[in-house]
Each structure stands twice: as C-alpha cells, then as structure tokens.
Amino acid sequence: MQKNKTLKGLLAVSAVAAMFSAFGVQAQTATTSTSPNQAGKVSKDGAMDNTNSTGMESRNAAGMNHASAGTATNGAVQSGSMGASGAGETAAGGTGAKLSAADKKAVMDMAMADMAEVATGKLAVSKAQSPEVKAFGQQMVDDHGQALQKVQALAQARGVTLPTELDSKHKAVSAKLEKLSGAEFDKAYMASVGVKDHKDTHDKLMSNAKKVKDPEVKALGEQHMPVVEQHLKAAQQMASAKPGTTAGK
C-alpha cells in the first residue's frame, strides 16, 4: 500500500515536470518566432511594417550619397588642382621660351656692359684720388651690379649662356686703368668709362630696342636706359668741371 502511494507521487511529480518542460519549449519557440517581427511587424492588412529596416535603408542611402558627394568633391578639388598646375606649367613654359637672335644679342650686350662697369667701378673705388670719382665708381658697382643680376635671371630662364669674363675691348680698358694711379687714373677713368663706355652702351640699347620682340627683354632694356643716361650725364658734368675740382684735372 505504501509503495503504491510512493509510486503515484513519483508519477505525479514526473507529470508536473513534463508540463513545465513543454511549457518552456513553447515559450522559447514563441519568443524566437516573434523576435524577427520587432524589425518588421505584420500589420492588420498583412503588410510588412519596415519602420526599422526603412530607417536603416535611409541611413545607408544617406551614407552612400554622402560618400558619393565626397567623391565628387574630391574629384572637383583634384581637377581644380590639376588645372592650376597645368596653367602654371603653361606659364612656366611660356616664360622659358627661347629667344630670337636679336633678343639674345640684346641680353648679351646688356650683360657685357654691366660686367665692365662693375669691374672698372671696383678699380675706381680702390685707385681713384678724387672722392667724387670714388663715389662715381661705387655707384657703377651698385647700379650695374643690380642690373646684371636681372640680366642673369632672364638669361637663365631663357637658356642663354652669358660670358663669364670681359671681352677683349673691355679687358684692354681695364688693363690700361690698372697701370694708372692718382689724378691720371681719375682722368682716364672718367673719359673712357664714365663717358665713352656709357655712350656706347646707350647707342646699343637704342639700336637693340628697334629689333627686340620679346616683351621681357624689351622691358629689361627700358630699365637699363634711364640708369645709363643718368650715369652718362653725371660723367659728362664731372669731365667738364674745372681742373682740380673733379676727376683729378
């Protein structure tokens, strides 16, 4: 009798456990089946409510549009940069154009004149007796030294090889002046360099200006002209001064 009661109790407990187990499986199944509907619920008419998925699609579409816009912007920037670079290269190519024979001669003449004035000007600074002649020589070094730098810059940009030393004519003048000193040097310097050389340079500038076509070479010649004219005028005034006042006369 007692055994039968015990057996019935065990069966009852097993049945209850089986019920709870079955209920748990059903609950888990229900949870699993309804979980997807949180991202897309079925409405009463059977249409899928894609609120969340639509939001994700919108965000993705917006992100793709933003990326496309960024790509387009980058493309525009790169295109603009290449355009500017290309324009710069074209300008540089234009600046680096070769000179004609007449333009090249004009550049060479200006370079030689400037080199000679600097060389003889240095002699005047060291050898002249008159303070005025020394000052004139220093002005030649300063003014023609600056002018020579401009000529050298243009020549380099245009592929013109300038001379590195004086020609035979200017070498002869320098050699003669180096043998002189005092008042004798002052007189010879102002006559040969101050007056004669500046007249020759002025004449060459005038002659070359009629043949020059390149705008930069023409502009450089125009910059030289007033400097040479001012030097020539000052040299003529000093050369015509009374003896003993200037140029060692």
Image (cartoon, rainbow, N blue to C red):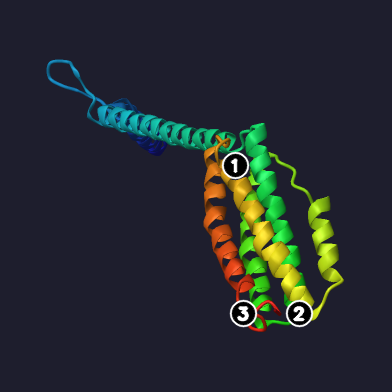
Asked if residue 92 lies left or right of residue 186, the reply is left
Asked if residue 67 lies left or right of residue 166, the reply is left
Residue at numbered disc 1: 207
Residue at numbered disc 3: 242
Residue at numbered disc 2: 183
Report how far apart the C-alphas of labels 1 and 3 lie in the structure: 34 Å
Residue 98: x %, y % from top left? 64, 33
Residue 78: x %, y % from top left? 47, 34
Foreground mark, 1 or 3, reads 3
- Circle nearer the N terminus (2, 1): 2
Which amino acid, mark 1? Ser
Report how far apart the C-alphas of labels 2 and 3 lie in the structure: 14 Å
Residue at 60% over, 41% down = 208
Label 2: which secondary element: helix
Which amino acid, mark 3? Lys
Q: Quadrant of the N terminus?
A: top left
Would you say the residues marked 1 and 3 are in contact, meaning their CB atoms lie under 8 Å apart?
Answer: no
* Front-most of residues 235 and 106: 235
